Amino acid sequence: MAAGAGTGSGSGDGATRVVVIGAGPGGYPAAFHAAHLGMDVTLVDPEPNPGGVCLYRGCIPSKALLHVAGLLRETEAAAEWGLRFERPEIDIDAVREWKGRVVGKMTGGLGLLTRQRRVRYVQGRARLAGPKMAVVELSEGGDQTLNFDYAVLATGSRPQAIPSLLPGSPLVMDSTDALELASVPPTLLVVGGGYIGLELGSVYAALGSRVTVVEMTAGLLPGADRDLVEPLQRRLEGEFEEILLDTRVESMREHDGGLEVTLAAEAVERPVRRFDRALVSVGRRPNSEGLGLESTRVGLTDRGFVEVDEQRRTAEPTVFAVGALAGEPMLAHKATHEGRVAAEAIAGRPAAFDPSAIPAVVFTDPEIAWTGLSESQARERGIEVDVLRFPWAASGRATTLGRTNEGLTKLLVDARSQRVLGVGIVGADAGELVAEATLAIEMGARVDDMRETIHAHPTLSETLMEAADLFTNASPHYVDRRRERALRSRAGL
Amino acid sequence: MTIEFALPELGEGIEEADVLRVLVSPGDSVEVEQGVIEVETEKATLEVPAPAAGRIGEVRVASGETIRVGQVIVTIDEAAGAAGEARAPAAAPASAPPEPAPPAPPEPEPGPSPAAAAPEPAPPAAPAPADEAAPEPAPPARPAPAPASPAAPVHREGEPVFAAPSVRTFAREIGVDIREVAGSGPGGRISQDDVKRHARSRPAGGLGRGAPAPDPGAGVDFARWGEVERLPMSRVRRTTAETISRSWQSPHVTLFQKADVTELEALRRRYRERVSRAGGGNLTMVAILLSVCASALRQHPRLNASVDAAARQIVYKKHVHIGVAVDTDRGLLVPVLRDADRKNVTELSAELGSLAVKAREGKLGLEEMRGGSFTISNLGGMGTGFFTPILNPPEVGILGVGRALTEAVWDAEAGAFAPRLLLPLSLSFDHRIVDGADGARFLSWVVEALEQPLLLALEG
């Protein structure tokens, strides 16, 4: 009786016909999984291969460039360890080419996988024409009509453009332009101190730009716990020209081959400044326009996200939506998981999107990563938690890397059940370390589960084990005085 | 003009049906009233007739699918010229069985008719009333969560569920709301066993709320003990299972008594030909029992009643409709003979014959299986003697008929054993409203009537 058993009348073998619109990290996994489950799948995207923003203009190219930037910084830091390099020669064209090869390899691989999965790939832009039909404006010209039993919308998001910040100017970049790496401007203004601004700002700073970051709120990376941001901010203050918090860009104009920018803040020296270029990274917005949603019952939130239920189904029963289009957080891995959920739901399986933890990683140096409950969320929601902080100064591995001053591993634990509810990490490879923490939270691990799991020595992963040990303040390498006092007062001593 | 032909109302309370066969293909021409698909509802199999003549455009359902009332089955491009007259029948819900229409008044549904489709590239088919409850081609809904248990959610607000993803998936699969499960692990972690335990502890049977009630078989890996095969329950099976589970809610008692039908059997043989010639078909003991029970029910109205527990009322029926359990290859079906008390044995015999044939051919309309006030279940053909029939709620009585056997019976007058044909009868009744003595009196009345056929004429 499963709908997966086939509702197709037009298709040859009677398999359920699924059209996936958008081949990013939400769309292509949805398509591949649907094909794996035996459905007849068509994947539509304007690019020649799957990949979406993530592979073409986001996660992957930015990480390739961040790798380059990281290596540059390492060569500088190495002086302290007795290694002195000559000033590196930066061939920006070659760097751009390397980034292009990375992207080409990944997207080409996805193209191959698409064929191996027997997913039909249609290059073009699709829009719905009712609850059972889509029309594709083909990249090669002409239209193609696709009838489907189910559609999965996965059109993602795009950089938010601010009219007063000259979105059309060749001197003003969004993240897509910045990743093109057309040139390395002597001075760069980054508008927005979120993860995109900081990651790309780091790249340009490492390549030689003098970078100024302007953030409207009181701190970088709004939403992240302050104790995780603080070490990053300290480091970036050394790498960037200036970080201006509580500051807005009031206006911007092209002037004499550069940009004249007027800043607004309580106390800002020199409110009018000049930059060669600007990068506007003030957020992203979902691509929910132009999709033909008005021909269906699909509903939108006031922020333009498609409204979905637990299975990622929209108000139109034949239409699903995943990824950035379906709401925050706009993260590739969240989209991928949703894509699978949608495919399973279409196949009639009892799938639901109900994660206990979605990891978030900021690929700056040091990296910041968190998963599950954050300390600020706990405070907002009035959830009482024990916070266990293990500083990396007590980690052997961090010391060998010369990164003791900027590392912290933090566990949020429910004192009653001793369950780990959230983990935050700042430090080298935090993005890798957070995986274990996410699994721990999903599996319902308690602090003793983490403490009693043997971790390899010497690794940074030990910091998770030792942080768990702080629950009873029994870490072999660190005595937390505050924790001790807290435990004593709790015990009535 | 293209019609989007949606599944019409099939009967009161019927919201969905399983598609057994699709009888048309795109491009086929259809006549008005020609069958488009064959569906199976709770207990009836029926063809859904086309509302208009024309050519089939799209077929939107496939066999094996469960479809809801209001869901579009096919699009029909109305035959030119026929459009005007054809649209009218389209608006009326197609009456369920193609046979003589049931008494159900086919008044049009209040909502927009499914056939009133707007021109093609239009917004989705005008939402019929049924859509709101459950959208049409929805992928199979996940198992509905358990009926709200009186227990407060164990889970604390703002915390993720304390269970691994695999355990959460398992809970969804068997229809358990994991937030209601108490975890037995350290700190309250929920294991798969906790989910199973929770599922078992839930009130089983469901008070007709339609929630799947996990039973001890739920989630058990039977393959551990040897090879197994899992097949879906047919709708008839599921309905039977639900009804039978409900019947445990009426505490019932079974009485056994044998009736000496030696003389009656002789009469049956003597008049069999005559009944047959009069169009009564094959005169069976069940047909005679129908007549006897109809009279007994008039004499003992408590057995012809139902309980409305919510209203604290006993509903005495002024009509006598008797269901007869029929074993078919689709499962157990119980067609109902209406007004059995107003029909003679020949009429009852004829009607019984035709209903049994319909039942076996899967052609019973739903209404032909509703509204019974008493049931007769005959297992004599299989050689069974006494048995404990289970009530067919909301009826309060059911008579089980076993195989008549010739036995030696002591004849006090003659001072000798005599061979007598004895028919084992088992009467189950709802003890909430029928006392043991009432039941015994009813059964004795039936036995006496069988033994002394003239009683029917005198008292029946």
Image: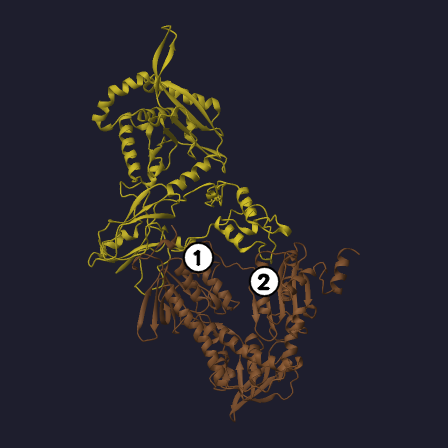
Residue B8 vs A326, above or below: the answer is above
In the picture, one chain is yellow; tell me its letter.
B
Q: Which quarter shows the N terminus of chain B?
A: bottom left
Q: In the current view of this chain or complex, which residue is farthest to the right? A: A493
Q: Distance between the residues labelled 2 and 1?
A: 28 Å
Q: Which amino acid does label 2 sit on?
A: Glu
Percent coordinates x, y for residue B113 in the rendering? 33, 55
Taking B301 as reference, is A488 left or right? right
Residue that mark 1 sits on: A345
Taking B69 as reference, is A337 left or right? right
Mark 1 residue crowding within 10 angstroms, few (<14) / some (14–19) / many (20+) = many
Residue that mark 2 sits on: A436
Of the numbered discs 2 and 1, the one sitting upstream in the chain is 1
Residue B351 vs A54, above or below: the answer is above
Give B151 or A79, whichever is nearer the viewer. A79
In the picture, one chain is brown; tell me its letter.
A
Instruction: State the image quarter where residue B331 is shown.
Output: top left
Give B80 or A248, whichever is nearer the viewer. A248
As drawn, the label of residue A117 is: none
Q: Is residue A379 visible?
A: no
Q: In the current view of this chain or complex, which residue is farthest to the front? A: A82
Instruction: State the image quarter where residue B339 is shown.
Output: top left
Q: Is mark 2 on a helix, strand or loop?
A: helix
